[in-house]
Amino acid sequence: MNEPDPSTDLPSQYAPASVEGPLYERWVEAGLFRPEVAGPDAEPYTIVIPPPNVTGELHMGHALEHTLMDALTRRARMQGKAALWLPGTDHASIAVETLVERSIAEQDGTTKQQLGREKFLERAWEWKEEFGGRILGQMRRLGDGVDWSRLAFTMSPELSSAVRRIFKQLFDAGLIYRAERLVNWSPLLHTAISDIEVEYKDVDGELVTIDYGNGVHVATTRVETMLGDTAVAVHPDDERYRHLVGTTLTLPIVGRPIVVVADEHVDPEFGTGAVKVTPAHDPNDFAIAQRHDLPAITVMDEDARIAGTGTRFDGMDRYEARKAVKDELASLGLIVAEKSPYTHSVGHSSRSHEAIEPRLSLQWWVKVDGLAKAAGDAVRDGRTVFNPPEMAQRYFAWVDDMHDWCISRQLYWGHRIPVWYGPDGQIVCPAEGDEPTGEGWHQDKDVLDTWFSSALWPFSTLGWPDETADLARFYPTTVLVTGYDIIFFWVARMMMFSLFAMQDVPFTTVHIHGLVRDATGKKMSKSRGNVVDPLEWIDAYGADALRFALARGANPGTDFPLSEDSVKGARNFTNKVWNAVRFALISGASVPDALPASADLTDADRWVLSRLNTVAASTNELFEGFEFAKLSEQLYGFAWNEVFDWYVEVAKVQIREGGTRAATTRSVLGHVLDVLLRLMHPLTPFLTEALWTTLTGNDTVVTAPWPTGDATRVDPDAEARFDRLRAVVTEVRRARAEQNVAPKTCLPAHVAGELDLDALATLTNLEYVDAPAAGGVTVTAAGIDVTLDLSGTVDVEAQRQGWQKDLAEAEKELERQRTRLSSPAADKAPPNVVQDWKRREAEADAEVQRLRGLLGLDPG
RNA sequence: GGGUCCGUAGCUCAGCUGGGAGAGCGCCGCCCUUACAAGGCGGAUGUCGGCGGUUCGAACCCGUCCGGACCCACCA
């Protein structure tokens, strides 16, 4: 006999907030994150996951993602699959910027602004050489189970190589080109930013209408751009201006001749119907200029200061110039109207928050139409499935209307564009190792958009372009878990590049989760100051509590608020599990090799086994559908409300009986907890590891088999009988509460009907007598009468009030059923439904009779 | 302007293809009952956003209005 000793193994009545300490190493050993230990023939299960923020700021969204992905991985591993994470992407350029700036500021005491762009850039590359490793150090503290060797890959030569490779493939296929276009320019960051990094905000400006001569009035909110005007556009059908089309006006101040063109883009209803055209500083104007072959004149420099106009405005900041130009026009008498304030929306940089300035510049682009079409088709024909399916709409909205992708960034971190320029204007994209070195050759100074290299993740991490065994086995990956906010950024790009490079989808399922919001449903953001550091709650309540709270809110695709209360609730639950298992161990529960024969089991045993197997089967299904919230809720309810509140309480009685009954009960209890802990393991790994290994004496729950439910244990009869017991117990407890009988007072009682009397007595603190006490209180449930002897101290009024309430309810129900049965519905509804109504009518009727009898009323 | 989603108990949300309104938290009452007060037992709470329609029957389907969130586009 080798009984576990809970006093040493599970010492406290409170589950420790953090039991994770030494467990992680053991899991790695057990192969949770090393797929090869599952065996060469094991079914691969690969998860592509977004990274923790490289600066070390793990936020709640990451905590959610890690929770979900870890749960999927653990379940897969328990199913014997070869589970593999592909964590992280090259988000280097997103987050490292901040880190680099901060770090350099700390070391050198200089800011980016003080150093100036060129100097800072140099310094940043130096920093990378010197301190790049520190980034990994910061990442290391972030999560359990990350395969760091793979994460380190983000910074590795291998990834750089892969980036070079795919760039060249696209370049050679003519899908990458260089063109002068309008880009969203950030005057603060000195870089182009992508369309999706632009946030539109409403600002109050003014709408100024200027007289361009010949009766042409144009309106603008950006007066200073008039310096770069090269045309005025009107609608081709606009009678007012038809005679002017093709003629020339003179641009005020500058004196340049500008042409009047007719273009469909112009809305004749809006304003004066005439539009000034500034091709170098407005996307629409740029498009007009291309259609009409107009020159584009840049009048602002990289800092958004007026430059090169030859006017006195050169050198002025754009806002300064806006006012100065307006004043000049006013003094010339050319301002015909002013509307102020005029609210309009202006694009701002989502990172540096200043107004972006459309700017003509030479950038590298990916031609996306073919790639995007393929990406859309892969989802349309079901090679990749979105979950929940509605989310595919968002995806289509993006890929089906994608503009060419500007991939060059003027940043100081990322993969440099692998293009070299020669002394005679050559532009080449050499294979790695073939870089031209001669006099006058130099590499492009720009780096690639971070999403360019991120897009390679699903295959580059597996060894591509080499045909590795990993690539053959684990590609395409099983599932991508991510938020809907990143569909555009990442999912679409991975899809495009994977289809291009691998001729296959990167993943077969995309599971989209919602965004974690604060307790009041607001987006967590730094500017709102409502961001919660997950580590804080982990420290306070435990990793498992946070994980469970997150999983419990994770309805697919739906945002959910996460409050500290919900984490506390989850902590209370983990603690409850801790104590229940602790108690079971004290009571001698142990996991049997085989469950006792059904004939030797009580209704309670059979009931709990029936429920256990139903829940196991259902949990399994919910996992298949990524229904984390529902499966968490189910496990919570089953464990607490059924196993702990009812079975464990009955088990106490059965164990007290001793002998065979005690032995079978200990087996059933052990078995139930064994399976329950395994079911919970994906969500609360640390807690279940500690409890399960103590309960079973096994090494680790990581490799324990995943329960799927044994249908032969489902036993509706036992469930029905046990439900009767529960109904009677609840009624007796209610009567006790109504009669104000203290729990510790043992009441004499008489029971008429067939029931597990031992259980009833213990659960409601009764002592049986042979005959019902005269003047006692009788409660009825499930056809069983229990008469409590209150020794004449019956609170008649309280009792009558209880009856009155029940009667009112029963009468209401009776009324409802009668109305329904006498309505036309009774003829048209399906027979089984009508039968159900009749049954309910009869039940309600009997209940009404009974209660009226008790109250001394006429039988209704 | 185009689109998506949401409105169910005080709060946060479940309610599958239309047939008896649910959970967690919170609240009220009684209990430190030897696993657990981070607990136990009992209890109260809803014109399922409004109106109209389809149906024998609507939280669920259709229309419309109100209220809220978000995405895309545009704003001379």
Image: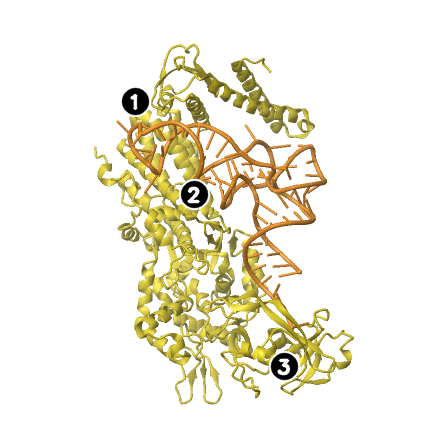
Chain colours: A yellow, B orange
When the figure is inspected, residue A338 is found, relative to residue A257, above or below; the finding is above
Dot 3 or dot 1: first in sequence order is: 3
Label 2 to label 1: alpha-carbon separation: 35 Å
Are the two marked residues, 2 and 1, in contact with CB atoms closer than 8 angstroms?
no
Residue at 45%, 76% (x, y): give it.
Answer: A410
User: Label 1: few (<14), some or many (≥20) within 10 Å?
Assistant: few
Residue at 60%, 67% (x, y): give it.
Answer: A344
User: Label 2: few (<14), some or many (≥20) within 10 Å?
Assistant: many
Left or right of A173? Residue A59 is: left
Please name the residue that numbered disc 2 is placed on.
A632
Residue at 57%, 87% (x, y): give it.
Answer: A311
Whether callout 3 and callout 1 share a subunit is answered: yes
Q: Nearer the viewer, residue A843 or A480?
A: A843
Image quadrant in which the N terminus of chain A is located = top left
Considering every residue shown, the one lying at the far front of the view is A331
Please name the residue that numbered disc 3 is placed on.
A229
Q: Secondary structure at mark 1?
A: helix
When the figure is inspected, residue A713 is found, relative to residue A265, above or below; the finding is above
On the image, the x and y values in percent for residue A539 come to 32, 50
Dot 2 or dot 1: first in sequence order is: 2
Q: Amino acid at mark 1?
A: Glu
On the image, the x and y values in percent for residue A82 come to 37, 53
On the image, the x and y values in percent for residue A79 come to 38, 46
- The subunit letter for the residue under badge 1 reads A
Residue at 54%, 67% (x, y): give it.
Answer: A371
Q: Nearer the viewer, residue A242 or A828?
A: A242
Mark number displayed over residue A292:
none
Please name the residue that numbered disc 1 is placed on.
A657
In front: label 3 or label 1: 3
Q: Amino acid at mark 2?
A: Ser
Q: Nearer the viewer, residue A119 or A203?
A: A203
Label 3 to label 2: alpha-carbon separation: 62 Å
